[in-house]
Image (tube, grey):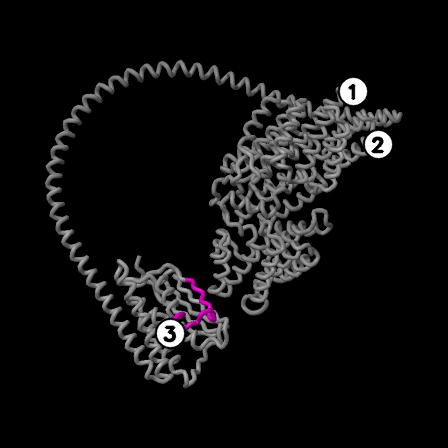
Amino acid sequence: MTEKLNISATKLYLSILLLLLVGNNSRAQIVYSSPVEYYNTSMKRLLVLSAGNYINQVTQGQIDQDSAVIMACQIYHINRLVPYNENYDGDSVTPGMKLIDAGKIKQTRELLLIQKPEDKIRTLFELGSYYLFKPGGGQPSLDSAQKYIKYADVATNVGPQQHWHDECMVLYGQYYCRTGNIKEGQAYFSSAINSLSKKNDIPVLISTLLCQASYLPYNSPGKLEILEKSLSLSRQYHENIGEIEALTGILTVHFATNMDRATDELISVLALQKAVGFRHLQFVENTLAYIYSLKYDFMKALSYNQQSIKDLQATGDFALASVYYIRNADIIMKLNQIKEGFRWYDKALNGYKTKQNQVFWYKSFLAEIFWYDQFGQYKQEYELIQKITKPFPPKTTFDQMYIALIEGSYYQHTGQKTMAELDYNQFIDLAKHFPPQYVHGELPSAYGRIAEFYVQNRKFAAARELAQKSILVSTQLKTPGVSSLDYLVLYQVDSASGNLKSAIADLKMFKMIDDSAENNKQRQQYAALVVKYQTETKDRSIKNLQQSSEIQKTNLRHATYLRNIILGGITLITIIAGLLYYLYRSKQNSNIQLTNQQKIITDKNDELEHLVQEKEWLVREIHHRVKNNLHTIVSLLESQTAYLGNDALAAVRDSQHRIHAMSLIHQKLYLTENTSSVNMSVYIRELVGYLKDSFKTDNAIHFNLNIELIELDVSIAIPIGLILNEAITNSIKYAFNKPGGEITIAFVKKVSYYFLTIADNGIGFSTNLPQNKPAASLGMTLMKGLCKEIKAEFNIENNGGTIITVKFSGENLEHS
């Protein structure tokens, strides 16, 4: 009986591998799959959500849902906001999406300053979603998300953008659910759903229902009702993607409570995916392989898993290939095909170990110590545990549970019963905190393994409790095959207690499950497949030998033919060589003529280059003299300031600044190789520095500069410099009545237009200028006249200060 118990324990222990060996990505970096440009945005969204859910499930939550979805986006080269922006961005990829995906959050915020109202609302939604679903962001990210959602709420509460308000309610719902206030979050979802129902906006209504359901616990009474409603609407209005997502949500609930129903629903999802042209079917097929393994229907499991491998090869989706290889190995091992199983394990388990990819390769380590334990190599098992767990301690509850289970088994088989019991008790305590949505066949198998230990140590009460717990979980999961060892344990407990009637019933249940005719039939089917494969291999070998003989005869005929061709070829080559020599001599003569002509052209080019250099020198000299003359004028004006009153003095000072602005441009032209264009980034910064020093602003006024690398023709640079001088001078002189002022200067190019913006946070600009400030009026007239000269649009407005915007065309202006 003990031998029978050990055999059954071995079979059940093997079942732990099915979910344990779910991934082995041996590289710290993400493995990318083939691009999926053949999908539209809805299909891309379905892909990354399916892949994200799959990664989250196969790692048993070790990679959280947000991180898993972002990982899926990276794997398939899809923008990280695509899974979340269905209701407000549709199929478009907005500038905000591009910036956020590139990690340029500051530039995204700056984009809000220049966007139209509707585009601005989209960017607010995008920033809110970015922070809302940012992995590991914690409360600071949630606070940032709330800030941008509030901005969007204010912008959409009234007016022409009110149609976006429902999306604000959805984002509020997600925000409150993520902060733990599910009741408040569900209230916002309900508000959005009521509004959408009145508008009869079916696609957005379906996605909102699905979103609402996703934030309810899997065992919440209302979750299934919401999912069923979204499924019904999807079918009624032929929203195929919505039907797939709704049915997936329903089967996720049933997966923990009704495995048979979940299986049927998963098969329906597979059929729907095929119907809409979704090519990445391997996620569903691999999950079906796992479910049928739990049901001990290994032939179906093998069939689905091999199809999933074919589909990942067809789509070039090798990022998670090791998951499918390991599952294939585990199923084959269940069919007692050890050699073939190890071949698939060898294909899957490779690469090096890092903490960055520990979530994947740790599964391979756990599998390795399992096999040491399985084959009684306990010393190697213990040494490997110590070698790995010291530099890489288990991070997750599941890994900690499994290490405790294997260490308990080691101590059990090396006679250290006290240590074994401590580890087994640690496993039981950890299992109490294991998320119920990730409980599968490996947990009852472990309970049965520990119950066997208690039987051997005659602790029958503890053994009965664990065996009954294992049977209960197996029954809930609809995986009765896992519980055969538990009935054997109960048989031994009842026998030792003298309860012979129960012991006989327990033994019958054990025999019925363990000697399942279906299991034997599947093993026989697999053995028949192996024989068929080997027979076909031998037939192919015989056929190959026959083909080899024919190939040798053909090769002999080809050799004779080839010899004749070579002789003919040598003759032809001789003729061609003669022709080539003749052409060579002709080309030599032509080259001599071309060389003479080239010398004449080179001499003329040198002469022209000399003339060009002289011209450039003269132009620089002119700019130098103009600059000196302008400085002389500035000096003359400075000498007159001692004899002038306040108004005249201010006018002279303004004239000095204007002359200096022009002088600075001529200085730049004189000092650079290019005498026709000015680097505006350098020029503007030096002009601002000059004005700061002239007015002695010190720290009273802070300047913010956003100047792109732009070069302009001198004919445009001088008016722009004068406009800048007037605008900055006006802001310094009139905008601020107390320290702490800010002046922002931006000069950027968008498409074929340039935008120059000078803004301050001062008291603003009055359209009715006072008579005692004629300089401001003159400056305004000058700026408008300069804009008219370069055909630019001039705009001035009050918005928290004065904002001056100059927009002009970039055609024929920029020099590169």
* Residue type highlighted by circle 3: Glu
* Residue type highlighted by circle 1: Met
Q: Kindly identify which residue carries mark 2.
A: 461
Q: Is residue 448 left or right of residue 612?
A: right
The span from disc 3 to disc 1 (Cα, nearest Å) is: 101 Å
Q: Kindly identify which residue carries mark 3.
A: 726
> Is residue 295 shown above or below 666?
above
Q: Is residue 476 left or right of residue 110?
A: right
> Is residue 110 shown above or below 599?
below
Residue 215, how many percent across, how many down? 66, 51
Front position in the image: 671 or 589: 671
Front position in the image: 78 or 213: 78
Residue 661: image quadrant is: bottom left
Front position in the image: 74 or 612: 612
Mark 1 lies on a secondary structure that is loop
The span from disc 2 to disc 1 (Cα, nearest Å) is: 20 Å
Magenta residue span: 691-706
